[in-house]
Amino acid sequence: MKYKKNEAKEAAKEMLRGVWTALPTNFIDAERLDEKGIAFNLEHSITHLKIDGHYCIGNVGEFWAMTNEERMRVAEINVDVNKGRVPLIAGCHHQNPAEAAKLARHAQDIGIDFVIILTPYMAARGDDAVYDYYKLVADRVDIGICLFNTNQGHSLSPKLAQRLATIPNICGYKQGVSGMAFATTLRETVGQQIEVSVAEEAPWLYNIAICGDHWLLNYCPHLYQVPGYLPVRDYTLAAQAGDFNKAVEICKSINPLRSTLGRWIPGYGSSTKMAIAEQKYWMELVGMVGGPVRAPCAEMTEENKKLMKADLEATGLIAKAKAGLAAAAPQKRAA
């Protein structure tokens, strides 16, 4: 680790910055990881998409369909591929706090920078229970822990977040529940202590300009961007430089992609299923590795694949991906 346990909050304020993505986990089948696919997608995201950080083994990473050994292996692949170029977060979500602590300890030992842990999604029905869960995990590790609030477990209210922020190595908060008012109250309550990310790209420019946010953690950066076309990065940099006219112009230009995403990959809590297969197919269409999902996620029908491809072609992103990948490919030397 690059910091001591009692320095986790300061380290998070320094490292949890910019545009981060959250990649799916690639599988060969229900029994095997696609290790080459996992490595390819991360390298692609760092080298060509210029992400500022990466979060592995989250909700879009199908953590619930993986063994602990598989999850630890994915974290190891991330460290091996990354070679310290960008900060890394590993999802250590588990209903059992002892297992969550074991995953977090492994992440700490191999060189992951931070971990993120969902609120327990069974049994915990009150603030005291959730606090005790996180306190137990945090006491067993030194690595910084980010909270993750979604509709799947007991809600992390600003009051509970403030209480949790007193734990030395609780250092970040990923807000996966929609609602600007809630996020505003959250920032006012704990924003000076721990770094907050609203896990949605659409309000990111507003969050930079009006709310002073520094960190976007979301899966859109690897869906909206392809080599040579980095609109999320570009409007973020423009906004951070104070050029809001340029930032707004770029931000508005990706509305067709946002509309396509809304049809096929709706956000947290807004759909009757986890649209992981749709995200993986989108990735295949723009030159990344997709592959199968694991139960209980469902695969796409061939008809839906045709419809989604047509929608994405209409945005021009597939053509941009082909051109960008061709330009980025190593040039062969003349004989």
Image (tube, helix red, strand yellow):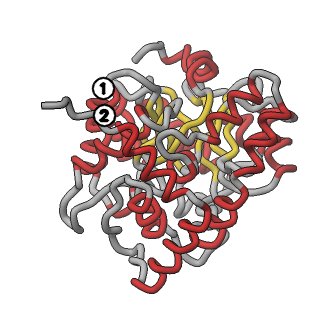
Q: Quadrant of residue 140?
A: top left
Asked whether, in this view, residue 103 is left or right of residue 286, the answer is left
- Residue at image position (64%, 21%) is 13
C-beta proximity under 8 Å, tags 1 and 2: yes
Most distant residue in the front direction: 335
Asked whether, in this view, residue 207 is left or right of residue 94, the answer is right
Q: Which mark is residue 106?
A: 2
Reply above or below: 280 against 234: below
Q: Quadrant of residue 85?
A: top left
Rate crowding at label 2 as few (under 14), some (14 to 19) or many (20 or more) other CA atoms within 10 Å.
some
Reply above or below: 76 against 274: above
Quick one: SS at disc 2? helix
Q: Residue 250 or 167: which is nearer the viewer?
A: 250
Name the amino acid, label 2.
Answer: His
Q: Which residue is mark 1?
A: 109
Reply above or below: 100 against 83: below
Quick one: SS at disc 1? helix
Quadrant showing the N terminus = top left
- Residue at image position (73%, 57%) is 255
Residue 223, given in percent of the width and then of the height, sits at 52, 53
Q: Residue 242 or 201: which is nearer the viewer?
A: 242
Task: State whether residue 188 appears in this view.
Answer: no
Residue 9, given in percent of the width and then of the height, sits at 61, 21
Quadrant showing the C terminus = top left
